Image: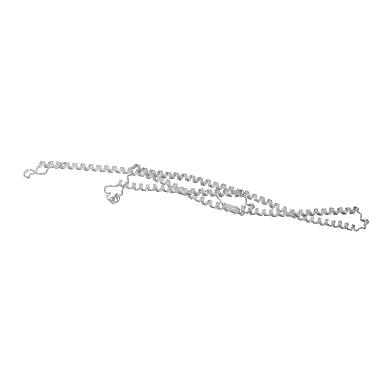
Amino acid sequence: MSVPDYSTQQGGRPDLKNMEIMLNHSELFRAESRRLILEADKACRRMQNDDSKRFGQRARDIQFLKKELELKLEEVILETDALTALQSRGLKALEGIKEPLRVTVLCLEERMKRAPSERVEDDVERELLKEREVLEGVASLLERIVEQMTEQIRLNRSAKYHLEHDLKEKSEAQWIDNSCAIMTTHSITNLQLSTNKNSSLPSLAVTPKQWENIADINIAKAEQQKTNSQSMRALVESVLEQTAADMQKQLDATTKAFQMHIQEIKSAKSQMEDKLPKILSEITSQERLREDLQVAITENEHFLDLAKTRLALRLQRPGKEQCHDLVQAQLLADIQHLSAHINKLREEAAQSQDEQRALVYCQLKLQEDIDMKTSSLYIDEVICSQHREPIMIHMF
């Protein structure tokens, strides 16, 4: 709108017509300005309302993703705690194997102290070796599982860190957008200082889609680690249950082998102990028999001396009286028979001596076997049983 000319007419008299035009022009100008002011105010208020709505929508979007992140974070924390507790159980189970394994090795060493003839590869020996193999295998398996759980816990915590970091950034962004939403023209003065400080920082060009994808990626990674962790927990639970059952089964088999072997040793030892008095009695009987044989030999020798004396005395008969009569013939026959009897009795006495030596050898051997059985029985029934009695397989 052009401004009218304020010049006066000739003679310096005011031009009333021009003044009227000037007044009208001023009124129109004022009206136009007020219209512009109202339009500008409406536009500013409309823009502020639109911005507030956008800030509100943005805050709701952030809040939605925050809830998703918080839910997933809670799930990951709970899963990590569950896996950590399970790892503790695995470590206890691994620690619990040490004592049974030590006892198994100790029993093998103790049984090596048996007499050489008793150190045979019996059922107990085989079961003990198998037991050691089972325990060592379980220990090795649990060590690998504990290492895998340690790695999975690290991955879970890594996912938790990214979720927490994303949540922290979104909380900051939500606070900023909420502050912007409630900001007025009167409150910007206090924020200008902090705004100016950050004005030099470069802005990352992230599209809304990329912004959503970042949270989705973190959630997806956390979900994957949670799933992996749950699968590992199921596997570890199964392994703990199966290994405990395997160890208990083998311990029971070894205990049963011990019990059967102990009964076998007791039975064999009992039979030997029952046989020993019979052998001792037989040795005594042989001694008595030999004494009786010796008495018989002496008596037969006396009769033989008598027959020989009679025969010698009859040889002193006068020449024509040297008749080979029935008496002479009987004396000669008696001497022959008595000599044969004496030789036979001496052979029997010698045979009795040999029998007695054999019986004494059997006695010594039997006593030695009884002592060895007693030692073996003590090792299996007392030493090994005492070592194995406290062993218990726990379901950690």
- Where residue 61 sits in the image (x, y, percent)? 35, 43
Question: Could you say which quadrant of the image residue 285 lies in?
Answer: bottom right
The colour scheme used to paint the residues is one colour
- Where residue 295 sits in the image (x, y, percent)? 80, 56
Q: Residue at x 84, y 56 (%)?
A: 304
Query: Can you say which quadrant of the picture contains the N terminus?
Result: top left
Can see residue 396? Answer: no
Q: Residue at x 31, y 42 (%)?
A: 54
Q: Is residue 52 left or right of residue 321?
A: left
Question: Could you say which quadrant of the image residue 56 lies in?
Answer: top left
- Residue farthest to the right, as pictured: 320
The one of 1 and 375 positioned closer to us in this rendering: 375
- Where residue 19 sits in the image (x, y, percent)? 11, 42
- Where residue 152 sits in the image (x, y, percent)? 45, 47
- Residue farthest to the front, as pictured: 319
Q: Is residue 368 left or right of residue 165?
A: right
- Number of marks in the image? 0
The one of 275 and 17 positioned closer to us in this rendering: 275
- Residue farthest to the left, as pictured: 11
Can see residue 116? Answer: yes
